[in-house]
Image: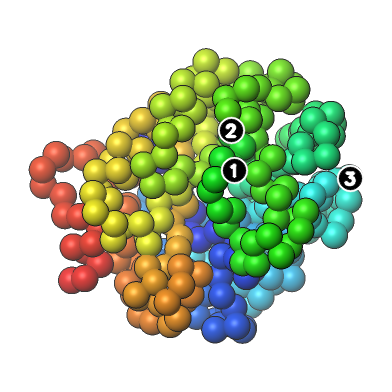
Amino acid sequence: MVEALVLWNEPNNLSHWNFHLDPDWKRFSEMVKLASTAIRKVNPDVPIVLGGVSACDCDFLRLMASYGVMEFVDAVGVHGFPLDWNHWQIDAWPDRIAEAAMVCGKPVWVTEVGVSSFGAEEVQVFGLERTLQLIRGLTERVHWYSLYDLPPTWPAETRHKEAEGSSYYRHYYLGLIKADGNPKLAMSHFPNDGSVGFCQWFHFEDHRLEDSVAWMKEHGVQYLRTGLSWADSYRPNATEWFDRQMAALEPFKVALTLCFTPAHLGVEEHHTSPPRDLNQFAEFAAWATERYTSRMESGNQPTAKEVAIQ
């Protein structure tokens, strides 16, 4: 079941929102407001979460609050990877969460937190145990990133790729399970009591979907964050894949992230570009809300592409 809709992913990260096209994030904030309004018209009860803020950046949250965004969301998602990327130490987690809650006046969900095994699997074990020790009880949701390593033949979602050096390659080592299916040391340290969920992105027609579902059910996982790509909605058979993914994830409480601009609808032709028409993202959000937060009626639903071009 979908327990919340998350609007975008790391909008303060150049790899997810091309902010040279929107340097003050005013277009982004307006897009969130329009999408939230569209969602509420379809389903006024589904919680709306502001897309996970990279590095738990409270200055970005202050900016969003100044634009009135907090009036349109029910919670705020934050991300943190202090052992791999962020310029703060792991022990700062409680203070970061407290500041985010004070700034936004909303519940704070940790929608992504993780530690790579890039240097050593033992580092990931330490990071998992210490992170959970620090933030459990401070937030309603903790989504560990991630269950599976990124396959080495897939590109990581980042702007400058290999030029980023080790920062880029760390993306491939964040799972508890290697890309070949073998477990890492940290797997046996992941709690099986349902208190911690995962953030696991599924690519279009991802071969890992069924195995991920089986592992999570076997290990007592109760909630999950994943996404539907607006850009993917223009692929052939997109709705069929979306339906298959969401049906497989039905046993879990899903925080469903909506993000990524279809290139042909962007200010620039790139999935991180702001859309030329902000209402088009709102239309996609309304479509996803109608289809996946209410009972599906087979054969009677329009495709995402049909809705987007109306």
> Which residue position holds label 1?
152
Q: Residue at x 38, y 82 (%)?
A: 276
State the SS at label 2. Answer: loop
Q: Residue at x 40, y 51 (%)?
A: 228
Which mark is in front, 2 or 3?
Answer: 2
Whichever of callouts 2 and 3 sits on the residue coming sooner in the sequence is: 3
State the SS at label 1. Answer: loop
Q: Is residue 147 visible?
A: no
The quarter of the image holding the N terminus is top left
Q: Quick one: label 3, few (<14), some, or many (20+) residues within 10 Å?
A: some
Q: Is residue 282 visible?
A: yes
> Which residue position holds label 2?
179
Whichever of callouts 3 and 1 sits on the residue coming sooner in the sequence is: 3
Task: Return the mark for residue 181.
Answer: none
Which mark is in front, 3 or 1?
Answer: 1
Q: In the rendering, at what x and y percent does residue 188 appear? A: 71, 18
| Mark 1–mark 2 distance (CA, rounded to whole Å) | 8 Å
Q: In front here: 215 or 283?
A: 215
Name the amino acid type tagged 3. Asp
Of all residues, the one furthest to the left in this rendering is: 299
Q: Kindly indicate whether the residue at mark 2 contacts the one at mark 1 (C-beta within 8 angstroms).
A: yes
Q: Residue at x 32, y 33 (%)?
A: 247
Q: With respect to residue 51, does 12 lie above or below?
A: below
| Mark 2–mark 3 distance (CA, rounded to whole Å) | 30 Å
Q: With respect to residue 85, does 1 lie above or below?
A: above
Q: Quick one: label 1, few (<14), some, or many (20+) residues within 10 Å?
A: few
Q: In the rendering, at what x and y percent does residue 298 appear? A: 14, 39
Whichever of callouts 1 and 2 sits on the residue coming sooner in the sequence is: 1
Please give left or right for residue 286 compared with residue 159 in the image. left
Please give left or right for residue 226 compared with residue 1 in the image. right
> Which residue position holds label 3?
91
